[in-house]
Image: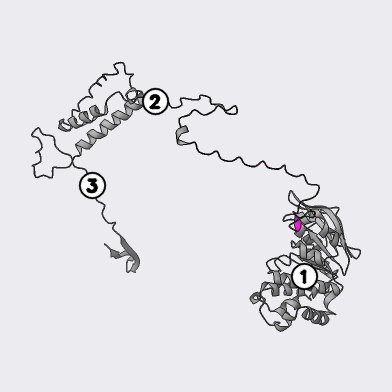
Amino acid sequence: MLECKNLSVFYGQHHALDQVSLNIAPGEIVVILGANGAGKSSLLKAIAGIVKPEAGSDIRMDGVDLTGMPAHQIVETGLALVPEGRGIFGELTVLENLTLGAFPERADASEAANLRRILELFPQLEERKKQIVRTMSGGEQQMVAIGRAMMSAPSILMLDEPSLGLSPILCSELFKTLEAVRKTGVGILLVEQNAKQSLAIADRGYLLEVGRITGEDTAENLARDPAVQKAYLGGAAGSQSGAHADEPKLPARAPAAASPAPPAEDAVSAPAAPRDDLRITAGGHGSRRIDADSVIPERIDDMVTRAASMQSAPAETPRPAPAPKPMAHDVTRPPANGDVQRMLSSIEQAAANALKRRPAATDGSPRAAPGNGAHEEVLPEIEVYRKPKIEVYRRVKTASGEEMKKIKGD
C-alpha cells in the first residue's frame, strides 16, 4: 500500500503542495481531480522522487520510507510513473522501449511473463514490435508508455494525464485498458482532467485545490456531488435547468418598454408634455455662436488682395502689412490674440517665399535679365545623387611582400 502524510512541496517561494495525505492499495483505482495548477503533477513527482518534498513529509510504500530516496530506488519498491507527455524513446522500436522498462532488479525474474501480459493487454503492440515508436499514433504511443512502466512489475502504477491529446475513441479504449490493468492486481493512482470517464472506472477519488486536499469519497458519491458536477463535470444536480436548489434566484427582469410611436405630422410643432423624471440643465457654452471677425482682425478678401499685390514687389523689400480695415458693422473689434496673429504671419511669409521661387513664364515672354532692375526669378535647387563607386581589392603575395590588387571597380 502507498501512503502519503503531510506531503508538502515548494518551488522557491511557491507552495505547490500543502500537507497532502492520501493512500492507495493494490488492485484499486484512485483518481485525483483538480484544475490546472492545483498541484496534481507535483504530487506524483514528489511520490516518485523527482521532486524533493519538504521536511516533515512522510511517503511510505508497504511500510518502507520513500522520503528522500532516489527515483531509481523508489522504482525497486514497486512504484512506476507514466509522466505527462509519455516520455518514450521515439527513435527506438516498441520492443526496445518495453525491454528498457524491465531494467529494475525486481523485474528480472518476471520479464518474459510481464512482456506476454503486456502484449495481451495491447494486441496492437504485438503486431508492431519492430516499429519505430515516433511513427506511431498518439494512442499507440500511450500504450507503449504504459507497457514500459508495467515491465518494471509495479504494485502501484501512477499515470499523469494519460488521455491528453487523444481522440474520444482512443480515450474510451485507454480507460478500458486501465480497468484491465487493475484486474491484474496493480493499483492505479490516476491524475486526469477527464473527470467523467475517470470517475466511471475509479473506486475512490480526491479533490485537490491549490495544493490542498479538499475532499475525499468514493467515485460514485463524487460523481453525484453537485459541487463536483459543477466544477468538473460541466453541470449541476437539481432541477432540469441545472441550477442548485439552494442557489439564490435572480429577480425577474422587467419587460422592456415599448418604443414610443413617431408623432403625427400635424403634431410636430405641438409642445411636448413635461416629465417629472427628466431635468435639463445648462452647462458650458452650449451652442453659443462666435463671429469670425472677433478672432481674425482682417477680412479674407483683403488678405487675398494684399497677397496678390505682393507679386509685383521685390523680395528684398517686402511691403508691410496694411493695417486692418475697420468693419462697417463693427468699429470696436477686439485685437487678434497672439496665436492667430502668428499663424497669419507664417501664412504671409510662406506666400512671399513662394513668389521668390516662381518658375519662368511659359507663354514665350522673355525672362528678365539680372541687374536691369527687374525682379530676378530664383529657381529651386535640385540635388542629383550619383551612383556610389564600388571597388574590390584582393591581397596578393609578390616578390617584395604583399600588396592589394584591384579586381573590380566602377
Q: Earlier in the sequence, mark 2 or mark 1?
A: 1
At x 35%, y 68%, the residue is 397
The reply to whether callout 1 and callout 3 are in contact (CB within 8 Å) is: no
Indicate left or right for 335 with 10 as reference.
Answer: left
Residue mark closest to the camera, 3 vs 2: 2
- Visible residue check, residue 200: yes
Q: From the image, which quarter does the N terminus lie in?
A: bottom right
Give the extent of the magenta segment.
231-257
Residue 118 against residue 291 in the figure, above or below = below
Is residue 218 shown to the viewer in this render? no
Q: Position of residue 263 (x, y in %)?
A: 49, 36
Looking at the rendered structure, the secondary structure element under dot 3 is: loop
- The image shows residue 255, relative to residue 156, as above or below, that is above
Under mark 3, the amino acid is Ile
- Tag 3 residue: 382
Quickly name the residue at label 2. Answer: 289
Helix, strand or loop under label 1: helix
Is residue 233 located in the magenta-colored stretch of the structure? yes
Residue at the image position 72 percent from the left and 69 percent from the top: 171
Q: Which residue is mark 1?
A: 175
